[in-house]
Amino acid sequence: MRISDSTIDQVRNANDIVDVVGLHVALKKRGKNYVGRCPFHTEKTPSFTVSAEKQVYHCFGCGKGGNVYTFIMELEKVSFVEAVRSLAERVGIAIEADQRADQEATENEQLYEACRAAGKFFYASLTEAGEGKAALEYLHGRGFTDETIRAFGLGYSPKAWDALAQHLKREKHDLSFFLKAGLLRTRDDGSVYDYFRGRAMFPIFSASGRALAFGARKLYEDDQLGKYINSPETPIYSKSRVLYGLFQAKEAIREGRNAIMVEGYADMVSLYQGGVRNVVASSGTALTAEQVQLVHRYADELTLVYDADAAGSGRGVDRPAGRRPFPGAGIPPAGRRCGPARLARSGGSRPLGGRSHHRPHARRLRGGARAHGCPPGARGRAARTPPARPAGARARGRGRARREPRPAVTDSNGVPRTPRHGAATPRGPSRLRRSACRARSAPT
């Protein structure tokens, strides 16, 4: 799809680069420009500069720069056409295709379309087909309302081997893109079958709200695959670079500059429905450097709230050696953990994150993620309070044990003498010198 030059200029002029970048980066005005931490690489000192006058950006750390279109293309990994379309929707400009241009979309756009079509089929299978009743009961049993199911696009994949494939054939879709998106598989004889069968479906969206992939939860005991399975890696989806629920939660995260990280899809949805809107899920993986960088675009603090079982306790932070995972990352303290979904359903619990942090179940620790159960202010020490100091032990921060003061030394006339080095006296050296001068000058 080709867009006319006049439309491209109109959309660019209608989108101020400071406003667009400000949706993803916390900017501060410095002179004529705005500065912030670069969203394309991890940095502590802001080196990302946006010029309102020139309508361009540049990072002095990684060297990336450009206009509002290149920013969206680089940030969301989309084509130029998709960047123009996204910014046009933001300001309400209708896009008209150039009839002289090629009408074929790029491969990535076709993969997005394939995921969108599959998501519509899964949602219809949940809400309209009789077979989806089991999945609907499971979702309602988790406490999800119909409004929440609709907001997250939750669905159901039928048990039949080719339910999705047959539906796509009836709709005259090109199955090759559904194969590349991991939604269909090919047998040795060339026939295709569904990858997801008999499962509750959780669509995974990009930060801009486009369907990328799916997570699927087991519903039937005869299902031989794992409890949760995900779409395979594709050109538009990498599990280590995506956070489930970021599209729904990014505004709340940006507003409070803090985020909560849970493990599973259902945990995230439960907390979000319970009023904790600044929550995302790592999809059951260890927290990666790419996910940290993604959260860092919107938040300054991150709290990890993993399940209280052994699997949740074993989750960690997968990061390069020597790199702090996040300034202000926290973990649940040992012995005080409970599942996020249970926490969301518990009555009277204050929301996690920010100043209303629910400390009995999770704690934010500044300066990086520390060992489980580390008490506030202990900085890695195991004990909550220091042990009692035995009598005669050295005082903390002093070089030697405290001595008893010695009596003042005087001469035969009663004049105090200068004490030996190291001897403690009730008087300081300056007072001793003044006392000796007064004693010598006194009349006899």
Image: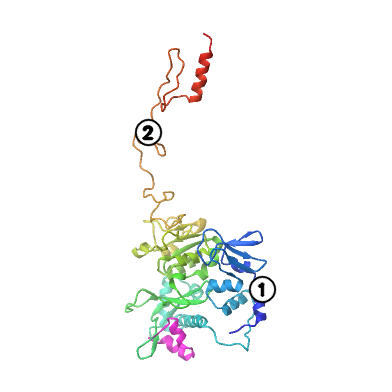
**100 and 404: which one is in front?**
100
Q: Position of residue 44 (x, y in %)?
A: 52, 59
Say whether disc 1 or disc 2 marks the residue closer to the N-terminus: 1
Q: CA distance from mark 1 to mark 2?
A: 73 Å
> Where residue 1 appears, x then y in whole percent?
58, 84
Viewer-closest of 210 and 83? 83
Q: Position of residue 127 (x, y in %)?
A: 46, 80
Judge from the rendering whether residue 36 lies leftward or rightward of residue 367; answer left or right: right
Q: Is residue 384 magenta?
A: no
- The residue under label 2 is which amino acid type? Ala
- Numbered circle sitting on residue 296: none
Q: Which mark is residue 401?
A: 2
Residue 179 in percent (x, y) is at: 43, 84
What kind of element bears circle 1? helix
Give the crowd class for mark 1: few <14, some 14-19, many >=20 residues within 10 Å: some
Residue at point 67%, 80% (across, down): 6
Q: Residue at x 41, y 86 (%)?
A: 163
Amino acid bearing label 1 = Ala
Choose top left, top right, bottom left or bottom right for residue 100: bottom right
Q: Which residue occupies the extreme top position in the image?
A: 444
Per the image, the residue denoted by label 1 is: 14
Foreground label between 1 and 2: 2
